[in-house]
Amino acid sequence: MARPRSAPDLYLLSKVSTLYYLRAQTQQRIAERLRISRPRVSRLLQEAQVHGIVQITVAPPVGLHTELESKLESRFGLEEALVVGADGGGGRGGAELRRQVGGAAAAYLARSVAPGETIGLAWGTTLDAMVRALTPIPTEGVHVVQTLGGIGPADATAYAASVVRRLAGLLGATPVLLPAPGVVASAAVRDALRDDPHLRPALSRLGAIDTLFVGVGSLASNPVLNDGASFPPGTVEELRAAGAVGDVALRFFDAAGQFVHTSLDDRLLGISAEQLRRVRRVVAVAGGAEKANAIHAALKAGILHVLITDQRTARELAARGR
């Protein structure tokens, strides 16, 4: 027959809680004062919460969004979500949104980078904003790898090699560049370039990236995809026909989060969808109302571990199902 549990000692629960939470005494000091063991003090503090004697509340300062972040983490199985105060609107607010989201990404990178880590970096204006917001951080044995060949004009500030060089310089890390176009004429050209000794260092590291920082592109609003010059004619139409809504490092997926295959895949020189799935930690730095559908699809794809976005986009995502 099970032994009946004794009634809680409400006096002792209250006494221990008062000394610990209101008088700021250590558990060891309380144990000595009340002549009980330190492990018992720890158990009593836990029991005090069960009985409602201790009720802990967290009141984040105005401007923080920890409850919304927790909702995103729970709903989409994220390791971490970071939400900034920008409202996610377009137009003139786009630059401010990129500044805030990029600044939050820079702070995340600064606190999470580890010695000996291999960081992958895709291209994009928000990632450029992240690098601009970063202050120099001394690191040891870190490599920064360009994960996609160049897209768009070589002198653009968001050009992949430029961003990689600047990030590596700020970290005191080794840049590993992919000095080739991101989109080439044919699969045969791509395969020939894969054998080029100048490209092998970057290509060989694509399967060993520890942390990958990416933007999330929307098929409808991606300026490079729609500039009529960076991609072969008919690319957007082919992607639409395949059901694509967005991309990560130009690997496109549909609204259900399934990667779609088009002729563009055979002409891309960069990280593959399979390699994306194997990266230990993929950090998406993306926001804006026009990207909500693409970000939602990327979350469904299960390739993101960390999401850094704005509050308006975060609220919309949190209201959706997985």
Image (cartoon, helix red, strand yellow):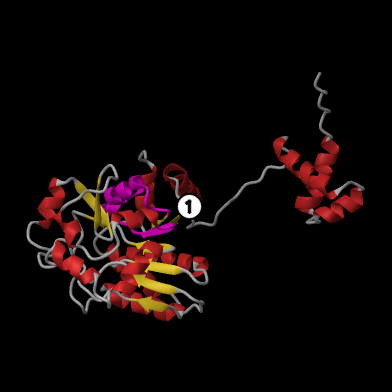
Q: Where is residue 296 in the image (x, y as percent from the top left)?
A: 32, 47
Quadrant where the C terminus sits is top left
Which residue is drawn at the image coordinates 28% and 42% (left, top)? 256
Q: Which amino acid does label 1 sit on?
A: Glu
Which residue is drawn at the image coordinates 52% and 72% (left, top)? 115
Label 1 sits on a secondary structure element that is loop
Q: Mark 1 points at which residue?
A: 79
Q: Residues within 10 Å of mark 1 (few under 14, many from 20)?
A: some
- Between 107 and 15, the one lying in front of the other is 107
Task: Specify whether residue 172 is in view.
Answer: yes
Quadrant where the N terminus sits is top right
- Between 168 and 41, the one lying in front of the other is 168
Q: In this view, does 224 lie above or below 11?
A: below
Count of labels in the image: 1
Direction from residue 27 to residue 250 in the image, left or right: left
Q: Where is residue 88 in the image (x, y as percent from the top left)?
A: 32, 56
Q: Where is residue 19 in the image (x, y as percent from the top left)?
A: 82, 51
Which residue is drawn at the image coordinates 35% and 65% (left, top)? 206
Which residue is drawn at the image coordinates 68% and 42% (left, top)? 55
Segment colored magenta: 279-305
Direction from residue 77 to residue 225 in the image, left or right: left
Q: Is residue 9 one of those drawn in magenta?
A: no
Query: Picture quarter containing residue 47?
Result: top right
Task: Specify whether residue 128 is in view.
Answer: no
- Between 97 and 5, the one lying in front of the other is 5
Q: In this view, does 209 lie above or below 134?
A: above
Q: Residue furthest top?
A: 1
Q: Is residue 289 one of those drawn in magenta?
A: yes
Query: Picture quarter containing residue 271?
Result: bottom left
Q: In this view, does 62 lie above or below 42?
A: below
Direction from residue 57 to residue 246 in the image, left or right: left
